[in-house]
Amino acid sequence: MNVLDYLAPDQWMNPAQGPLYVQLRRRIEAGIASGFLAPDTSLPPEREIAALTGLSRVTVRKAIAELVGRGMIVQRQGSGSAVAPLRPKVEQSLSRLTSFTEDMARRGLKSEVEWLERGLVVPSPEEVLALGLRSGDPVARLSRLRKADGRPMAIERASLPHDILPDPGSVTQSLYDVLGRSGKRPVRAVQRISAINLGEADAGLLGVPVGAAGLRIERTSYLPEGRVVEFTRSIYRGDAYDFVAELRLPETLS
């Protein structure tokens, strides 16, 4: 099967399944996720896709534009559109408590943030329990899409006691930098990692197909005296990270 056969409308088009540009976008996403549309594979010109599918060129262009915005398709002057080249994974240590900004800077990558939520809010029951809040205490909540060199990498949803972070708006890039300046940066954390398939909302933010592999990491961080200072739930792209832990044999057995 070639690319034009893969995009033939009898393979995927169904007027009852929503806007046609979304269906075309999902068809191409599925081809990328399955490996059929491999990195650097050229797509047919928009006019050919439009003629094959019966869609207008405006509809085809909108589907391609969304894929470009998600980093899945690249457009090269004079050579049309192609599946984005494969990028190496970021190797992330599980034995160091560092911020996303610090991790990316250490690798020579530019860290960027897109804010989804930032402010003092009424805590959820989960936040009350995780942070040990009293009844009526507000919580500082920071939800953001983290990017490296423009590539969406992770969705972070952090919650902190309001006396630890009374002004969430003071965080513009690195939360740990802000906490460090007030002497409230955590010194240890407990993390739980689980594999997931990304739902529509998270997949859309990370620019990957719905159902793509991801990692959910829940972290509880502590001050030196043992107080919980941060409760974070993060969603990471499965194709962007390798998590690495160093294991040592206990001294009594060596």
Image (cartoon, rainbow, N blue to C red):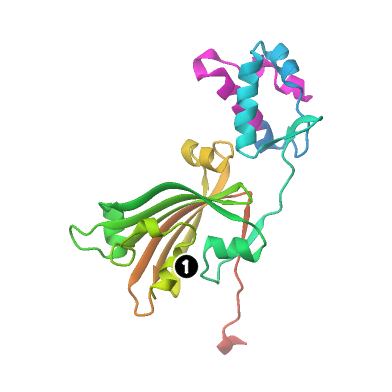
Quadrant position of the N terminus in the picture: top right
Circle 1 packing at 10 Å, graded few (<14), some (14-19), many (20+), is some
Q: Secondary structure at mark 1?
A: helix
Instruction: Name the residue that disc number 1 marks.
Output: 177
Q: Residue 178 location, x and y as percent?
A: 43, 66
Against 17, is 65 above or below?
below
Q: Residue at x 39, y 54 (%)?
A: 142
How many numbered discs? 1
Quadrant position of the C terminus in the picture: bottom right
Against 217, is 6 above or below?
above
Against 214, is 179 above or below?
below
Q: Quadrant of residue 58?
A: top right
Stretch in magenta? 1-30
Instruction: Tell which of 252 and 70 is nearer to you.
Output: 70
Q: Left or right: where does residue 93 sit relative to residue 180?
A: right
Q: Residue 186 location, x and y as percent?
A: 42, 72
Q: Residue at x 56, y 15 (%)?
A: 14
Q: Residue at x 66, y 10 (%)?
A: 54
**Residue 24 colored in magenta in the image:** yes
Label 1 sits on what residue type?
Asp
Which residue sits furthest left?
Answer: 135
* Magenta-drawn stretch, dominant element (helix, strand or loop): helix
Instruction: Tell which of 102 and 15 is nearer to you.
Output: 102
- In this orientation, does residue 36 appear? no
Q: Left or right: where does residue 85 sit relative to residue 159?
A: right
Which residue sits furthest right?
Answer: 78
Q: Residue at x 61, y 36 (%)?
A: 69
Q: Residue 175 location, x and y as percent?
A: 45, 62
Q: Left or right: where does residue 190 sit relative to residue 83?
A: left
Q: Residue 139 location, x and y as percent?
A: 29, 57
- In this orientation, does residue 144 appear? yes
